[in-house]
Amino acid sequence: MNKIAAILALIFFSSTAILLAEDTSRKVIEIAIPDLNPIGDFSPTDSANLTELLITKVSNISVFHVLERQRANELFAEIAHQLVSSTQLSDAVLNTNMQGADALLLGSVGELNGRILLNVRLVDLQTGTILFADSVYTEKDNLVSSIAGLVDSIQEKGLELGLNPDIPAIERQIATKNWQEAKRLIDSYVRNRSNHLDDRVRKLYETIAKGLAETDYALSKRYVSQHLFDQAKLYIAEAIALNPDARFYGYRDTIAQREQEWQFKQQVDSARAAQRLSGSAPSFDEAMKSYFQRICVDGTRIGASYGLNVDPDTYSVSSGQNDWGLDFSWTCSKKPDDGKGIVNWMYYVGASARYESVDSAARSVFLQGYASPLLAEALKVGNLVISAGLDAGPLLWLGPVAPDGYLLGVAMGASFTTEIKIEGREGLFATAKPDWRWFPASGSRSGPYLSLNAGIVL
């Protein structure tokens, strides 16, 4: 129990010390609120009443100490006098001799189309910069609640004015990657005229800017994933403004591409939805065009293989040897890469296995591999595909063909294929494949050969 009490006491005193440190880091802001300027035919009496309401609301903010109304009007008169010879509000503020105020809340009020228009600006009298500007355009009955919302925003900026941070406090926020808070603190630090914008502060600004840019970049990617492209473009633009990194420029182009793709998809979905609602089906011509556009010359062929002997002298073809087997091949288009062009430059690889006759009394297993590295073309007309190519590959003949029981060789030949596509890649095929077989160890068995293959395409 004593340990628990000690821990609780330590937490309490630590929290109290942090709160005291935060309190001492803030200062009370002396704010001047001169009379609101009535616009057009707006009643000065109503303007004075609204000024009093605004003063009352701001007085309830602990960080502000509101100057007397007369003194506030004197301060504004001095600034207005300086504006006669100054083109910028910041110059007029910095040239004034009035002291005793840190901030100035300027405003105007008028009536437009039966509604109240109230404009306010919060000016930092240390630098002459406008910290906050906003407008309220509301019905008379809602004016009090609208002013309350406006005062909440003024309070937020007042809290920033009241900060008096040091460099270590800024560095602590940077270390925890709390970039927004670090930016708020360093702005407050620089706003104090007694602080100098030295190299150390500039480097901190650079680090914070890069951190904020990374945060905006991450938010941009999140919005793209949600298809909120306008927000994504805003955040990537902020990231580029903070840190012109090549990644951000590249992602800006990616956003445009993703948006275009998404818009196209939405148009297609809308067209399909409209078609479903109307109950109309596509025309026959449109359906056929869509069908033919889906046809692809690529595919995997699996089929039966039948061999024919070719006389090397007369090149006459003879059958009756019953050289049956299986053939497997794979075809892929290189250009265009989707295989949907009328003319396609392509390549293919394949393998055959047949049980062939050696002579009238013996048979053997014959294995062949072949490949056509970009030496093939395909012509696609509707759902009919005609292709041709040159190929070569190794041979292995197992059986009573040599003293060792096998022969090694090479085949060089071609393939002529006709396919009828049923849908996409799928369909039926028939191939005539003439080859010249060459066996270095048995020249008598070298010569031409023709195989016919047919089957399905997947």
Image: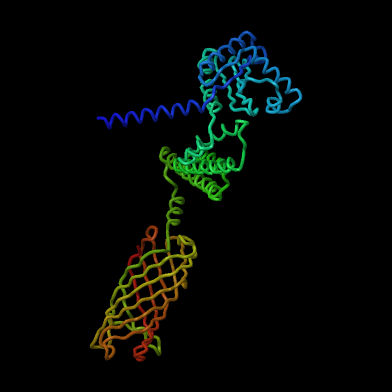
Residue 209 image point, x, y percent? 55, 41
Give the residue displayed 63% in from the left and 18% down from the top: 108
Using residue 307 as the reference point, say whether residue 336 is left or right of it.
right
- Image quadrant holding the C terminus, namely bottom left
Residue 171 image point, x, y percent? 50, 39
Using residue 429 as the reference point, say whether residue 334 is left or right of it.
right
- Compared to residue 180, the image places residue 300 above or below, namely below
- Compared to residue 365, the image places residue 31 above or below, namely above
Residue 24 image point, x, y percent? 50, 26
How many labels sit on residues? 0
Viewer-side residue, 45 vs 418: 45
Q: Residue furthest top?
A: 45
Residue 369 image point, x, y percent? 36, 76
Residue 22: tell me if it is visible.
yes
- Compared to residue 289, the image places residue 117 above or below, namely above
| The quarter of the displayed image where residue 30 is located | top right
